[in-house]
Image: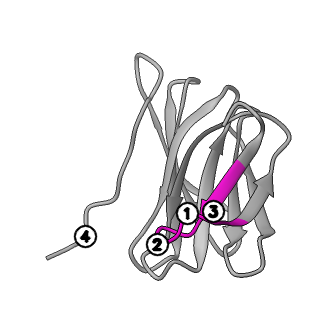
Amino acid sequence: SSDKTTRLWNATDGTLIKTLRHEDWVHNCAFSFDDKLIVTACHDNTVRIWDTQRGQLKRTLEGHTDKVRFSCISADGNRVISASIDKTARIWDANSGEMLSGFLFNNGANSCDFTPHP
């Protein structure tokens, strides 16, 4: 959100569960398949990985040179992919924060996703 937060809501009754505070705008967020983690794509050029149960920041992924527009986490929870206006997409190790791969495009990258193997 432009108010520098990600808010977790109870889908059944609409009550606010947790508010995750950021340094700048949040462009996107995505849950892990087990709902234990959430990744956020941020205006401050970072991706953040949060523990949804505690509402605590686990790791900040740094390396993009412009706003991160989109991020998501792999089905096994071990990889994060991010897409940025800096014309790159990056794959990260969710546990160590290490960048594993990077892809350069002609224009800013606005979305990304993982495709599970059959």
How many badges with numbers are in the image?
A: 4
Q: Which residues are magenta?
A: 6-17
Of badges 3 and 4, the one in the foreground is: 3
**Is residue 17 left or right of 103 when viewed as pictured?**
right
Q: Which residue is mark 3?
A: 8
Question: How far apart are labels 2 and 4 at the CA level?
Answer: 29 Å
Q: Position of residue 43 (x, y in %)?
A: 70, 31
Which residue is depicted at the point 26% across and 61% down?
Answer: 115
Q: For this rendering, which residue is in front, 84 or 96?
A: 84
- Mark nearest the camera among 1 and 4 is 1
In this picture, residue 85 sits left or right of residue 53: left
Question: Counting other residues with Cα less than 10 Å from the Cα at mark 3, is it few (<14), some (14-19), or many (20 or more)?
Answer: some
Nearest to N terminus: mark 2 or mark 4: 2
Lower position in the chain sequence, tag 1 or tag 3: 3
Say whether marks 2 and 3 touch (CB < 8 Å): no
Mark 2–mark 1 distance (CA, rounded to whole Å): 6 Å
Instruction: Determine whether the residue tagged by mark 1 lies in a helix, strand or loop.
Output: loop
What mark, if any, has residue 116 been given in the picture?
4
* CB under 8 Å between discs 2 and 1: yes
Residue 37 painted magenta: no
Q: Nearer the viewer, residue 54 or 106?
A: 54
**Amino acid at dot 4:** Pro
